[in-house]
Each structure stands twice: as C-alpha cells, then as structure tokens.
C-alpha cells in the first residue's frame, strides 16, 4: 500500500516542479529588462538601478537565481509585485476570498444540478432533450451565459443586482453562470457511468430482489457512476478558476480574476506568475488526492505497478 | 450498411459550410463591417439590419460575418500548432527510451496542470496581446490532448508486425518513422482536432472578450460581445447575437466531430 502512495505523491511533486520551472522560464523569456519593469514610471537614476539590482539579487548567476526562486516558492514566497511593490502573497491573499466563495457555490450548484439531471432524465425523450441542453451549455462561452442572465434577471426582471459583491444576492447570477457549463460536462460523465453500472451483474441482482428501478439507480448504480467523476476534480478546479476570471469581469466583482487581468494589462509578471503557479499547485494537490482516494476505495489499483 | 446522418448533423455541417464561406469570402455575404451610420445607432434587428446595429451604427450582421475570419483563423492556427507539436512530441515519447518517455509525459502533465485561460494569460503577459499571442497561447495549452493520444497509439504501433518487419529490412530511423509509424498513429487525430477546434474557438472568444485578442475596430466575436456589453440594457442584440454565433459554431463542430468519431470507430452514429 505504501509504494503506490509514495509513487503518486512523487509524481505530483515532479509535475509541480516542472510547472514552477516552466513559469520561471517564462519570466526569463519575457522581453525587456527586469530592472526596467521594476522601475516602471518611477524615478530612474543609476543609483536607483544599482539599488534594485542589489535588492532583487539580479547580479547573481541565472542558476543561483533559479534555485533561490525555487527555495522561496517552496516557502510560499512568490516574490513582489513590480507595480504595487508589495509581496504577491499578500495581494493574492486579500483577493482570494470572493473568488473562493464564487467557486465553491458554483461547484456545489453544478454538481447538484448534474446529479439531478443524470438521475431524472433516464427516459429516451428526456435523455435526448437533456443531452442537447448539455451540448449547448458546454459549447456556450461563459461570458454569453453571464450576459444573457444579466439581461433577463437584472435588467428585465430586476431580481438581482447588476454588479458588485454586496451580499448573497450579488453572488447568485455569477455562481449560476459558472455552474452551468460545469453541470453540462458532469451530467454527460455521470450519465455514461450510470449506463455502464446498470449493465453490471449487481444491477440485475438488485432488480431480481424486487428493488424498484429508482432504488437500483440511486442506491447502487450512482456510487459506481460517481467514481469516474472524481477524476475530474482537477479539471473542475481549472474550469472554475479560468471561468472566474471571465465571470468577475462580466459582473464587475472583485477577486483573483480581476487582480490577474489588471496584472496582465500592466505586465506585472510576478503577480501573473504567482496566480498561475498557485493554480498548478492546487490542481496537482487535488489530482493527487483523487488518485489516493481511488487507492483507498478500489483495492484493485494497489497492486498495479 | 450506410446510414444517412440525422438532421442535427446535416444542419451543423451546413452551418459550418456557411461559416467557412464567411471566413473565406466575407464580401459575398455581407457589406462593409466598419461602415458607421450615426443616424441608425443601436437599432433593433429588422429587415434593414438582420442583427440590428451597434453603438456606432455599424451593422451587427456584417460584423459577425467578417468576424468569422478572425475567430475561425485564430482557432484553426492554434489547433494546427497544437496538432503539429502534439503529434511530434507524442511520437517521440512513444518511441523514446523509458526515461525520456517519462520526462515528456510528466511535461505534458505539467502543461495540463495550468488552467487553459490562465496559461494563455501568462503567455499574453509576455508576448503582448493580439492575434499572435492568442494563437501561440491556445496552441501550447491544448497540445497535451494530442500528445497523449498519439503517444498511446505509438505504443501500439511500434509493437506491430509490420514495424518489426521494417526494422529487420533495414533503413534509416527517420524513414521508418515517416513511412510506417506516423501514418498509422494519425488515425484519430483529425476528428480530435475538429472537436479541439471548437474548444480553441471558445478559448479565443473568451480571451478577446477580455481584451487580449485582435484590437478594435477589427470585428472579432468575443471583442464584439465585450463592446456591446456596455449597451446591454438598451440593445441586447449587439452583444448576445455575436455570442449565439460562437455557440452555434462550437456546437456544430462538436456535433459533426462526434458523428465522424462514431463512424470512424465503427459504432452506430446516433
């Protein structure tokens, strides 16, 4: 049991290191001088330049700077913003709250909707309607969903505020916008899983015991259908974070997405890098956790390799 | 037994044909997308302007038709980069020694650890906004899709009898790969690329919605949405109709792609 666990954790660490290195290479590949980026529009004298080179350690060999970057990143120090002259971790820490609230509510809504849809649309005609709806949801750009919801529920019906982050009402439309594409994909995966589980011998046995079809579905097949959906947890996170950038822009909400966009526009590379590396970290942690959960749930996997 | 494709597939294929025509010869379908008419600003859809007009009095339909060129070209170029790089790296990983294979595979893993949109934003921070940055960013972010599939295919093919035979027959490695391995691993790639094209168009629209794509006044679907958003309260058509066209394009690509996939795999296309 220990070997496969260690193997998966080690793989996760290697992927993380590769991601951090790729991000560092991006920093090196950026056109223009790092000193120029830090000076920005501020006072520019040879003394200030020398001071910056000294302060940021830019005169050291590239390899030393790279190792120093890795060591600091491992301690959670992701550098300082060129623009705001503050630690990136502080900037991200302040803004992560609203985005997290949005993502968690959206994930909960999306998962709940997918469960209900996958279980209730078993009849052929319902399945056809639901499949078509899923395809449209998956293919619709999230900003379009957001704009349609805004125009119907805020402008026509006046049910929800147009923008901002005051209270729960302002969170509803953004969360629904993010949740709909998630529900589209998850419903497809769950439905395939249910189809496969219902063909298994245990489903036949359960039916032979006289269980109603609904009970077979919910009590027996659904658990099996949920397993493949667990592997999607990393993907789900990526979709929520990427989607949050767009949704925050549509609804004028504060959060990590707005910070990232502002940093991209201002070429504030350390902030962009920090968000990107952080998202890779969460992705790897979630995926490794999902892999380990699989090991616990399914003993057949423990022997492999 | 050959079965005719259903009405959904036929409609999707027809829509794609019109979209391709719009991208190749926009002037056959629509008038000048930049012609502003200050007397007819934000007019609702009607006989004169099918999709209405925007805040400068430009015809939204004309702009959507001309925007097809930008949006589809970005998606196509990005997919082309992803397929070329993905197939090359996938074949390399599939043929390589165990350690080199492991390194490449972990590289693909690392690349997919970044959410597509954030990786693209990082790329754009470095390369600057505009069409080139967009294409490169989406191309690099989606290459692991193709690389993984091709690597798995290469594993199967390299053990096939005809490859062993070709090795015994002699000849350069390059010739072996080009003549025997490559043609046989490419099978699933075109269909994957078709579905991937939809994803690329979607990502491109999202990034240009954020202002990272082709700069105004050139018409691009995502940018049109961002533009029209400010007038949403009085003129929904200027932002929602271009968005609907993006959705129809992506749905059509997926429907036709899946149909071809089922046919290719010998399953009954539904």
Image (spheres, coloured by chain):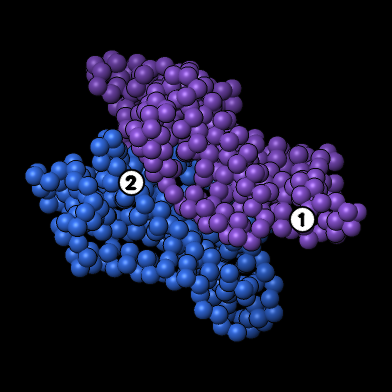
Chain colours: A purple, B blue
Q: Chain of mark 1?
A: A
Q: Report in which chain the residue with disc 2 lies.
A: B
Q: Which residue is at 15% across, 43% downward?
A: B41
Q: Is residue A252 above or below residue B238?
A: above
Q: Residue at x 10, y 48 (%)?
A: B37
Choose between B17 and A1: the one closer to the eye.
B17
Residue corresponding to mark 1: A197
In this picture, is A167 found above or below B63? above
Q: Is A64 on the left or on the right of A303, as rendered? A: left
Residue at mark 2 to residue at mark 1: CA–CA distance = 40 Å
Residue B133 visible from this viewpoint:
no
Res. A223 visible in picture: yes
On screen, residue A242 above or below A194: above
State the image quarter where residue A36 is shown.
Answer: top left
Residue under label 2: B240
Nearer to me, B176 or B186: B186
Q: Quadrant of residue A257?
A: top left
Q: Disc 2 on helix, strand or loop?
A: helix
Give coordinates of residue A259: x percent, y percent.
41, 27
Q: Nearer the viewer, residue B70 or B57?
A: B57
For the image, the number of numbered tags is: 2
């Amino acid at each position: 049991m220990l070997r496969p666990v260690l193997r998966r954790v080690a793989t996760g660490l290697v992927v993380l290191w590769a991601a951090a290195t790729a991000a560092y290479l991006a920093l090196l590949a950026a056109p223009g001088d790092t000193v120029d980026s830090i000076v920005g529009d501020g006072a520019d004298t040879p003394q200030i330049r020398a001071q910056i080179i000294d302060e940021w350690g830019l005169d050291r060999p590239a390899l030393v700077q790279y190792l120093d970057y890795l060591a600091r990143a491992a301690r959670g120090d992701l550098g300082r913003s060129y623009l705001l002259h503050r630690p990136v971790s502080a900037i991200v820490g302040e803004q992560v709250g609203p985005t997290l609230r949005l993502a968690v509510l959206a994930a909960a809504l999306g998962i709940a909707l997918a469960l209900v849809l996958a279980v209730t649309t078993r009849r052929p005609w319902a399945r056809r309607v639901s499949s078509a709806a899923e395809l449209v949801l998956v293919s619709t750009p999230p900003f379009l969903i957001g704009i349609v919801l805004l125009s119907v529920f805020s402008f026509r019906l006046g049910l929800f505020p147009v923008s901002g982050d005051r209270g729960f009402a302002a969170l509803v439309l953004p969360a629904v916008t993010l949740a709909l594409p998630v529900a589209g994909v998850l419903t497809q995966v769950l439905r395939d899983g249910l189809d496969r589980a219902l063909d298994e011998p245990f489903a036949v046995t359960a039916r032979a015991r006289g269980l109603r079809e609904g009970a077979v579905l919910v009590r027996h097949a659904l658990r099996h259908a949920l397993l493949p959906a667990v592997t999607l947890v990393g993907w789900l996170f990526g979709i929520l974070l990427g989607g949050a950038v767009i949704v925050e822009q549509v609804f004028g909400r504060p959060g990590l997405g707005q910070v990232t966009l502002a940093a991209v526009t201002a070429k504030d590379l350390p902030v962009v890098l920090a968000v990107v590396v952080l998202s890779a970290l969460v992705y790897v942690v979630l995926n490794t956790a999902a892999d380990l959960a699989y090991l616990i749930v399914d003993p057949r996997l423990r022997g492999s390799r | 037994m050959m079965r005719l494709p259903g009405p959904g597939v036929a409609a999707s294929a027809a829509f794609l044909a019109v979209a391709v025509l719009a991208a190749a010869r926009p002037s056959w379908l629509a008038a000048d997308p930049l012609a502003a008419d200050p007397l007819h600003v934000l007019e609702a859809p009607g006989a004169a302007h099918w999709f209405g007009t925007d805040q400068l009095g430009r015809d939204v339909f004309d702009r959507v038709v001309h925007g097809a060129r930008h949006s589809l070209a970005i998606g196509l170029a990005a997919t082309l980069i992803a397929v070329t790089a993905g197939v090359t790296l996938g074949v390399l990983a599939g043929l390589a020694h165990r350690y080199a294979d492991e390194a490449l595979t972990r590289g693909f893993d690392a690349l997919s650890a970044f959410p597509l949109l954030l990786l693209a934003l990082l790329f754009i921070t470095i390369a600057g906004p505009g069409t080139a940055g967009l294409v490169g960013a989406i191309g690099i972010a989606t290459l692991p899709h193709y690389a993984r599939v091709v690597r798995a295919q290469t594993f199967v093919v390299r053990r096939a009898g005809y490859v062993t035979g070709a090795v015994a027959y002699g000849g350069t490695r390059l010739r072996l790969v080009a003549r025997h391995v490559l043609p046989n691993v490419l099978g699933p790639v075109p269909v994957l690329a078709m579905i991937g094209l939809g994803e690329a168009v979607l990502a491109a629209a999202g990034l240009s919605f954020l202002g990272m794509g082709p700069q105004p006044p050139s018409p691009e679907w995502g940018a049109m949405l961002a533009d029209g958003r400010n007038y949403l309260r009085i003129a929904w058509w200027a932002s929602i109709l271009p968005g609907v066209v993006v959705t129809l394009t992506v749905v059509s690509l997926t429907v036709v792609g899946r149909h071809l996939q089922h046919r290719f795999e010998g399953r009954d296309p539904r």
